[in-house]
Image: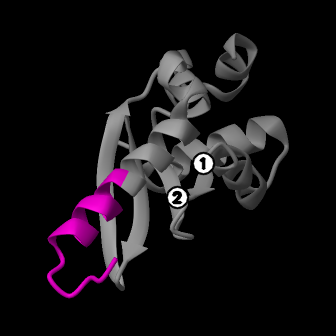
Amino acid sequence: MYALSKESGVAYSTLNDIANGKVDPDNCKLGVFRTIANALNLSLDELYDLCVENNESVTTDYGIPVSIGVRQKSFYIFFNYNEEPIEIELCKVNGDTRRYLSYIAKWRAEEYIRERRMNDPWNIF
């Protein structure tokens, strides 16, 4: 990381935030990505794919796929429920939460779905 910072001229803290998922690659400045890609001899697409590779997904017991992403230094889950897009903040980004992230995401999405089903007057169990 230190060598890449020296080679690219991108601040070590910026590289660290990108590598640890504290920065959403979709919100990163193109110039920063271009500089890093050039230093690593990668295309912008290759670098982007490396950065988003850490984004996980899980499937609930209800069969609903849930995407996990990062926004403003927090983990979020994204899924559709009854054709409605749902976005829920899980927790701040750090090494400890990343280890259990897929379990937390699945649990939180299922909790949301259960609550919605319980409050739906047309739902028949």
Crowding at dot 2, Cα within 10 Å, few <14 / some 14-19 / many 20+, comes out as some
Q: Tell me residue 51's x, y (percent).
A: 65, 45
Seen as rendered, the residue at the extreme top is 2
Residue on which disc 1 sits: 55
Residue at 85% from the left image edge and 43% from the top image edge:
41
Type of amino acid at the residue the image marks with label 1: Asn
Indicate the amino acid at tag 2. Answer: Ser
The residue tagged with tag 2: helix, strand or loop?
A: strand
- Secondary structure beneath dot 1 equals loop
Q: Which residue, as the protein is rendered here, is positioned at the far front?
A: 125
The answer to whether the residue labelled 2 contacts the one labelled 1, judged by CB atoms less than 8 Å apart, is yes
- Foreground pick, 100 / 28: 100
Stretch in magenta: 111-125
Q: Quadrant of residue 74?
A: top left
Q: Nearer the viewer, residue 87 or 63?
A: 63
Q: Is residue 12 left or right of residue 118?
A: right
Task: Check the picture and name the quadrant holding the N terminus.
Answer: top right
Lateral position of residue 123 relative to residue 38, left or right: left
- In the drawing, what numbered circle is on residue 103? none
Residue 108 seen in the figure: yes
Q: Which mark is residue 67?
A: 2
Is residue 117 in the magenta section?
yes
1 vs 56: above or below: above
